[in-house]
Amino acid sequence: MRKIIMKYLGLTLILMFTSFISKGQETLDLITVSGRYGFPQAYDSIYQSKATEYGAMASLVAPIEMNERSIWYNSVNYFYWHVGNDEETPPEIMNPIDIHGFILRTGLYQKFSEGRGLQVFLAPRFMSDFKNVDIDHFQMGALVLYEKKYKEGLKLGYGAMYNQELFGPYLVPLINVDWKISEKWSMNGLYPVYGKVKYQANERLSAGWSHFGLITTYRLGDEAYQGDYIERKSIDESIFVRYKLVGDIYVEGRIGYALGRSYAQYEEDQKVDFSIPLVGFGDNRVQKNISFRDGAIASLRFVYSISLKDREQSN
C-alpha cells in the first residue's frame, strides 16, 4: 500500500510540474527542500534523558494559467517529524515518534477588476505513521480567501481555512499580506500560518524574520497504539538569511525558537467539540504521553525560485 501511495504521489508531482505556467507573480518558490533540527530539551517529568527533534520538508508549487483572469493553483507539501530519546516507555506509547504528512492544495484563483480576487481551494491531507494505512489516515479540508489591492504595493486578503482534524473540526481565520513596504523591505504571508518580513540587501542576499505555526494530527496505524493519533503543535519564530547560489537556486538558513511545541498522543475517541487557534471548545482530552519543553531550532533549506518577470520579458 505504501509503495502504491508513493508511486501515485510521485506521478502527480511530475504532471503538476510539467504543466506549470503563471504570470501572476514576479517570483515563485517552485521547489523547496529543507531539514530542521530541534536542540535537545528536557521532559516535563521524571524522565532523565532529553528529547531530540528533527524533521524534513519538501514542497512543490505549480499554478496553471487558464486565461488572463483565472489560474488553477496546485501545491503539494510533504512533512516528516521524528522525536527520540533513551527512555523505556510502555508499548502503547509511541517512542520514538515517526510521522509523515502530505498536504495538497488545489483550486481556483479568480481575478476581478480593481485589484480584487477570490481563492477557493480544496486541501485534502494524508497524515500517518505509514502503518496499516486505511481511509482513517486521510483528512478533508478547504480554504477560501478574498483579496483586494488597496494601493500600489499593498494587497490584503481575508478568509478562513477549515480542516477535519482527528480531534474534530478546526477553523483558522486567515489574513493574507502582500506588502512591498519600500524598495528594500517587504512583508508577505498567510497569517497566522506562515509569514516573512524581509530586507533585500542586494540582488543575491536577503534576511529577516520568519513565522510558521500549524496544528496537524497524524493517525497511528500500528496495532500497538489501537487507533491513537498524534497532535503536533509548534509556533516557530526564526531569523533567516537567504543567498542566491547560482541561477535560480537559493540556500536559506534559519535559527530561532519553537513555542508551545508538543507531540501529544491521544486515544481515538478523545475529541474536541470545535477549535480555533489557541482555543479548543469542549476539550477534555487526556494526553497519554509526556511533552518536552520548548527550545531552540535551526533549519537549512534549498529553494528553486524562478523569476516570472524575467521570463515574460525574454519571451
Image (cartoon, rainbow, N blue to C red):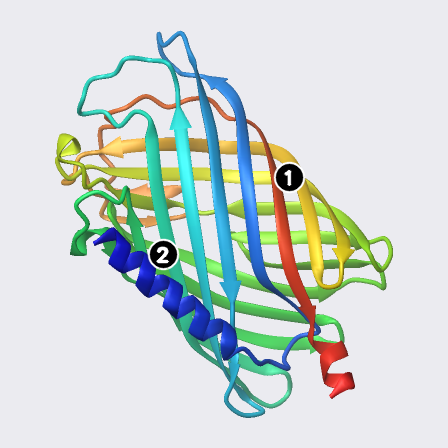
Q: Which residue is at a point 69% across and 58% down the rendered structure image?
A: 249
Q: Establish if 280 lies above or below 60.
A: above
Q: Please give the residue where the numbered disc 2 appears in the rendered image.
A: 171
Give the left or right position of residue 178, taking residue 64 as reference. Answer: right
> For the residues carrying marks 2 and 1, which lies nearer the camera in this image?
1
Q: Please give the residue where the numbered disc 1 appears in the rendered image.
A: 238
Q: Quadrant of residue 191?
A: bottom right
> Residue 8 in the image: x percent, y percent?
31, 65
Residue 230 at least partly seen: yes
Where is the C terminus found, in terms of image quarters? bottom right
Query: For this rendering, which residue is in front, 196 or 147?
Result: 196
> For the residue marked with disc 2, what is the amino acid?
Leu
> For the residue marked with disc 1, what is the amino acid?
Ser
Where is the N terminus found, in terms of image quarters? bottom left
Residue 143 at least partly seen: no
> Residue 264 in the image: x percent, y percent?
31, 32
> Residue 62 in the image: x percent, y percent?
51, 72
* Disc 1 crowd, CA 10 A, few/some/many (<14, 14-19, 20+): many
> Residue 216 in the image: x percent, y percent?
36, 46
